[in-house]
Image (cartoon, helix red, strand yellow):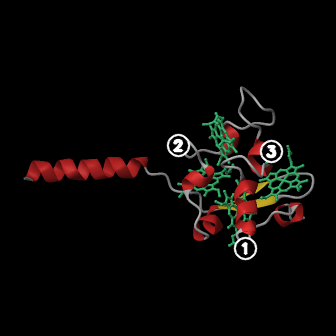
Amino acid sequence: MRKSVFALVLALTAGAALAVEPPKDTRTFPSKIGPVAFAHTKHLAAGAKCENCHHGPEQKKCSTCHGKEAKDKVVKFYDAVHSKTLDHACLTCHTKTVAAGRKAPVECKACHVK
Ligand code: HEC
Ligand code: HEC
Ligand code: HEC
Ligand code: HEC
């Protein structure tokens, strides 16, 4: 009995170590036409799921893999954000959200706030 409880505790703590917390801070992406403030908190409150943006087994910064240039068929960061048709692209969801009659920024100035 003791042994199995110990094994259970071990299993639970191993699981906890794998779970990743979404960042609580607002991240700011700079650009010439004004910075973009991105907040996980607002998206999660609006019902977004990790896998709507992150794909693959780990949640890392998009820029880890999506750079300034498209490499080996991996879209560049700009397109990963601004495409309105690609899965996991920010504007794909925003466009669908607006089409469904709810609020989300689609105009340049709604995200790039000077
Ligand atoms: C609406 C899109 C979106 C959703 C939903 C989302 N993320 Fe993210 N996440 C991002 C973006 C964009 C970044 C990159 C931020 C940056 O470059 O600083 C990021 C970065 C991260 C990072 C890396 C932070 C760092 O500084 O290395 C972690 C961890 C993470 N997200 C976890 C999560 C988890 C867990 C969930 C679900 C509970 C989640 N995210 C949901 C878009 C999202
Ligand atoms: C570990 C590397 C890696 C990270 C981190 C990553 N991507 Fe990707 N992404 C890829 C690769 C590789 C492809 C192309 C292959 C594919 O279609 O899966 C891709 C494809 C895409 C595409 C094209 C459409 C699709 O889904 O196939 C979009 C959009 C995209 N990623 C958005 C994002 C966003 C947004 C983030 C951050 C929240 C992110 N990616 C983080 C590697 C990554
Ligand atoms: C959903 C929010 C959002 C909307 C809407 C949006 N952007 Fe962006 N934009 C971003 C994010 C996030 C980045 C940072 C990613 C990057 O550096 O490529 C960015 C980066 C940029 C950059 C800098 C790219 C670089 O390499 O420095 C330019 C230029 C830009 N956007 C132009 C536009 C224009 C023009 C529009 C309207 C047609 C627009 N954006 C609409 C979120 C948005
Ligand atoms: C799954 C759908 C979905 C995805 C994917 C998504 N968003 Fe959003 N986003 C929303 C919704 C819905 C809102 C409106 C939230 C609200 O008004 O409370 C929003 C709001 C925003 C806002 C305005 C927040 C504010 O201050 O009011 C910014 C900026 C933004 N998103 C940037 C991004 C960026 C950058 C990405 C990609 C890395 C992204 N979003 C991906 C659904 C999404």
Residue 19: image x %, image y %?
44, 51
Residue drawn at the location 71% of the way across and 38% of the way down:
66
For marks 1 and 3, give the one nearer the viewer.
1
| Residue farthest along the top direction in this orientation | 72
Please say if the residues under marks 2 and 1 sit with CB atoms less than 8 Å apart.
no
| Res 101 label | 1
Going from N to C along the chain, the mark reached first, 2 or 1, is 2
Where's the C terminus, which quadrant?
Answer: bottom right
| Distance between mark 2 and mark 1 Cα atoms | 32 Å
The secondary element bearing badge 1 is classed as: loop
Q: Amino acid at mark 3?
A: Tyr
Secondary structure at numbered mark 2: loop
Residue located beneath label 2 in the image: 58
The residue at the point 23 percent across, 53 percent down is: 9
Q: Earlier in the sequence, mark 2 or mark 3?
A: 2
Could you tell me residue 111's position as x and y percent? 82, 62
Residue type of the residue flagged with mark 2: Glu
The residue sitting at 69% across, 58% down in the picture is: 93
Residue labelled with disc 3: 78
Compared with 28, 62 (above or below) is above
Residue occupying image coordinates x 50% and y 41%: 57
